[in-house]
Amino acid sequence: MLLINDLSFKRLSTNIFSDINISASPGKIIHIKGRNGSGKTTLLKTILNILEPSNGEVFWMGKNIKKNLSNLYNSTTFIMDKKTSTREITVLENIHFWKKFSSSSMSIDQIDKLLNLLSLKDYINKKVMNLSLGEIKKLELARLIIEQKKLWILDEPFSELDKQSIEIIEETFLDHVEKRGIIIFTSHYEVEIRKIEKINLTK
């Protein structure tokens, strides 16, 4: 479980967000909403201890993350709005890097099926720099399956995707929480997923 108690973040004299409380138990999806500048990305980075909150605490599996950081990171796939794939290497080379880095047990057949599902099979030997924005986004999201982590934290996962790809990601979300996974994501897109909890940061 991820538990967030009275989390606040201040930049200089400005409160970016205040007194955020989230209880994310296994099987839960949380959608963080808010206009641009409302602190959505900052909140995600604060949850992951990338930024230091001005007040409040974050707990993972019953322990403060400052005492449990390696466990949190080993359990988390964090997909930022900014691209993290390496532009100078191919789609397949990026996937093999993520697989090795996360000690994933995915087989070649499973990776092949994933590439087919995301319509990336024809691009496996293409360098990322030569892909469209939508294709790069789908490659980034492939990490959700490759890394096999319990907690997914995503910043604007539906941007640059077409309707079919959005539906695939929504189904992937549902499959993950049915297996007792946890998802926290920001999005301007109004996601049609059952049993989703929404938190609006806009004041």
Image (spheres, grey):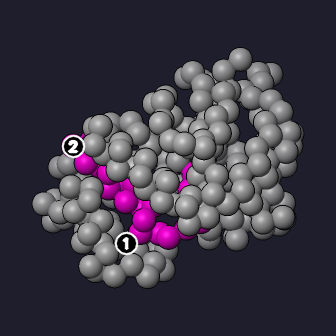
Range shown magenta: 132-153
Q: Nearer the viewer, residue 179 or 155?
A: 179
Q: Which residue is mark 1?
A: 97
Please, what is the dominant secondary structure of the magenta stretch? Answer: helix
In terms of secondary structure, where does tag 2 sit?
loop
Q: Which residue is mark 2?
A: 132
The residue furthest top is 203
Report whether 2 appears left or right of 102.
Answer: right
Name the quadrant of the N terminus. bottom right
Q: Which sits earlier in the primary sequence, circle 1 or circle 2?
A: 1
Kindly identify the residue that appears in the image at 56 percent across and 58 percent down.
177
| Location of residue 124 with respect to 105 vertically, above or below | above
Kindly identify the residue that appears in the image at 48 percent across and 80 percent down.
103
| Location of residue 158 with respect to 138 vertically, above or below | above
Based on the picture, tell me whether residue 145 belongs to the magenta stretch. yes
The picture places residue 183, in percent across and down from the top left corner, at: 59, 52
Q: Is residue 12 visible?
A: no
**Location of residue 59 by image quarter:** bottom right
Report whether 175 appears left or right of 112.
Answer: right
The picture places residue 153, in percent across and down from the top left corner, at: 57, 51
Report whether 19 appears left or right of 198.
Answer: right
The residue furthest left is 122
User: Looking at the rendered structure, which numbered label has been put on residue 42?
Assistant: none
Spatial separation of the CA atoms under disc 1 and disc 2 = 21 Å
Kindly identify the residue that appears in the image at 18 percent across and 63 percent down.
121
Dot 2 amino acid type? Ser
Based on the picture, tell me whether residue 90 belongs to the magenta stretch. no
Dot 1 amino acid type? Phe
